[in-house]
Image (cartoon, rainbow, N blue to C red):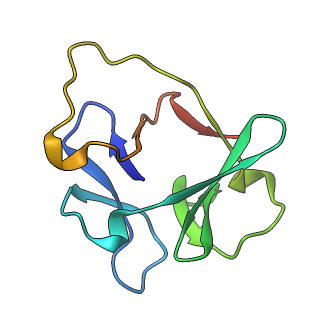
Amino acid sequence: MVIHLAGSEKVFDIPENGNYIATFPESGSYSQLFNIRYIPAHKFKIMSYGMCLEYDLKCDCVMRKECSNKNLQYYEVEPTEIFGFELPDKFKGRPIIYYSSLSYLKSS
């Protein structure tokens, strides 16, 4: 899936060999693709290259780290409706999550 930054043309990206999440215009590269895994109790883990995205309190950012049972690796996804949004043909069938630092994707 691709994680779009709400209100922006940018998406989450993990630069090559990096662990910090950055935002760049969508390029379709593998560094911009993430997997989501449902965990009971309505929580999700977001993964990239076999590692989990974890909210880091020290830097107030999201980083890629070894998967563990830390609460900061579990996310809740709040559904939102986007009116008047037409998905371009090249993205038909691709799951997209919109991320907002306000509330749409939040760490538990």
Rendered residue at 45%/69% (across/down):
20
Depth check, front residue: 90 or 12: 90
Near-viewer residue (99 or 88): 88
> Where's residue 11, x and y in %?
30, 51
The percent coordinates of residue 73 (x first, y second) are: 70, 56
Left or right relative to 41: residue 67: left
Residue at 52% x, 76% y is 49
Q: Which residue corresponds to the image point at 84% horizontal and 61% vertical from the top-left?
A: 69
- In the rendered view, tell whether residue 17 sits above or below residue 81: below
68 shown above or below 98 = below
Q: Residue 21, image x and y in percent?
A: 42, 63
Q: Residue at x 83, y 36 (%)?
A: 41
- Image-quadrant location for residue 33: bottom left
| Residue farthest to the bottom, as pictured | 17
In the depicted view, which residue is nearer to us: 88 or 52?
88
Q: Is residue 33 left or right of residue 58?
A: left
Figure quadrant of residue 65: bottom right
Instruction: Name the quarter where the C terminus is drawn.
Output: top right
Q: Quadrant of residue 16?
A: bottom left
- Total marks shown come to 0
